[in-house]
Image (tube, grey):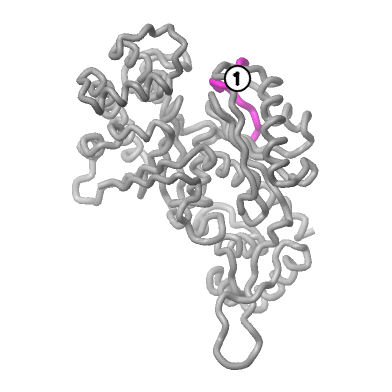
Amino acid sequence: MYDVISSQSDESPAPAGCGPLLPATHGESKPLRQQIFEHVRAEGRAARTDVTRALGISAGSATTLTADLITAGLLREVEGLTRELGRGRPPVALEVVPEGRYVIGIKLSDEVHSAVLTDFAGQMLADASLATLPTRKSMDAILEEIDALMDLVLKAAGKSLSDISAVGVGLSGLVDHSSGMVAWSPLLSGRDTDFQTAFVGRFGVPLLVDNDSNVLTLAELWFGAGRSMSDFAVVTIEHGVGMGLVLDNRLFRGSRGMGLELGHTKVQLDGALCRCGQRGCLEAYLADYALAREAATALHRNPRNQQSAHAMLDALFSQAKSGNEAARTIFRRAGRYLSVGLSNVIQLFDPELIILSGERMQYDYLYADEVIAEMQKLTLTSGRAPCRIETHAWGDLVWARGATALALAAVTDAALGEARA
């Protein structure tokens, strides 16, 4: 009915290469030169004959355009993966020149910031983490923490900031990817923050910023289970509840780049108070701060004490596993609200797969058989196969790696523009 994927590492069991394996079938087509480059990067290595078949172009076009990409320092020839028996020239394949560009991906969160540095082929060269206080901060304070984090990952990779072509950042909240504006985030003390301008002004490096659920979805699309899927959704449950959606092999953001805020869809009018200031949001029944509110009562703790939500929830989960009925009821109630949220996603978008991810997915009550069964009961699925559900228990670095996909996509556009010129 559902699959659980757990790993101590952040490496998804995906084929060699990185990036979507399926081309989008609608919308504006990319220049052929860029399609060739991205096909080679997605496959890891590809012969020219593979390129011609995959893209439906002539051998002459493939030869001319790959020669241009080699001259531009974006692709290089390597010995093929297999060698024919007998004499003759060894087969030749193409691959991305990994040292052509470097990018950094960053995940900002409430307690730990994470960073990953990758090369142009998407290979992870170094990672770093930085503990932080779970309080709202000014933009200047966030930039100070980013500075310290990037210094750590650059030193680990033996690089300097001048080697970096772009940085991708994912954070929770309402983020306009196209403008770099953060309308609201639980990490920032102010609203309508021009994150992109502030970052570029301080570091002088191009910045791509997006909602953290979107960067996790990009991680699945570029490095994980979604590489060969045209339509899938990712639902994240951590300090908040988020969602990312891929339609026709592309990340869907909405008309203003701030759609798919599943955590702030309403499931009960005048219901529980959400950290966004409104009531009845799905997040107010699922996120860790919401569960911690009820855990304080179930465990007879002072709700004003300084114990972290993580510690409170770990204690609650332990009590539930030990048979504490009050603790079990809290998780069962959260699971029912999750069923409502997932059924709404299925009714609206009909994805082939929903991936459940985030730190709270360590609590198996949230993806128990009863939760999935109730989700299906709330969904009009008569006469068709139900949506597949998987739980991916990756660590923090996969979010940062998804942010590198933001940066890699932008750097690729820029690099291919240079090659065309």
Magenta-tinted stretch = 177-190
> Which x, y percent locates residue 351?
37, 46
Which residue is at a point 61% across and 53% down the rendered structure image? 122
Q: Quadrant of residue 341?
A: top left
Q: Please determine whether, in this image, residue 398 is positioned above or below residue 140.
A: below
Residue 215: tell me if it is visible.
no
Q: Quadrant of residue 55?
A: bottom right
Local crowd size for mark 1, using a 10 Å CA cut-off: few (<14), some (14–19), many (≥20): many
> Which x, y percent locates residue 39?
58, 63
Q: Does the magenta segment cover residue 36?
A: no
Which residue is at a point 65% across and 22% down the rendered structure image? 193
- Left or right side of 226 for 53: right
Q: Please determine whether, in this image, residue 20 is positioned above or below residue 76.
A: above
- Secondary structure, magenta segment, majority class: loop
Q: What kind of element bears circle 1?
A: loop
> Which x, y percent locates residue 349?
37, 42
Q: Residue under label 1, please give it.
A: 188
- Left or right side of 86 for 412: right
Q: Please determine whether, in this image, residue 290 is positioned above or below residue 176.
A: above
Q: Identity of the amino acid at label 1?
A: Leu
Which residue is at a point 57% across and 19% down the rendered structure image? 133
Residue 11: tell me if it is visible.
yes
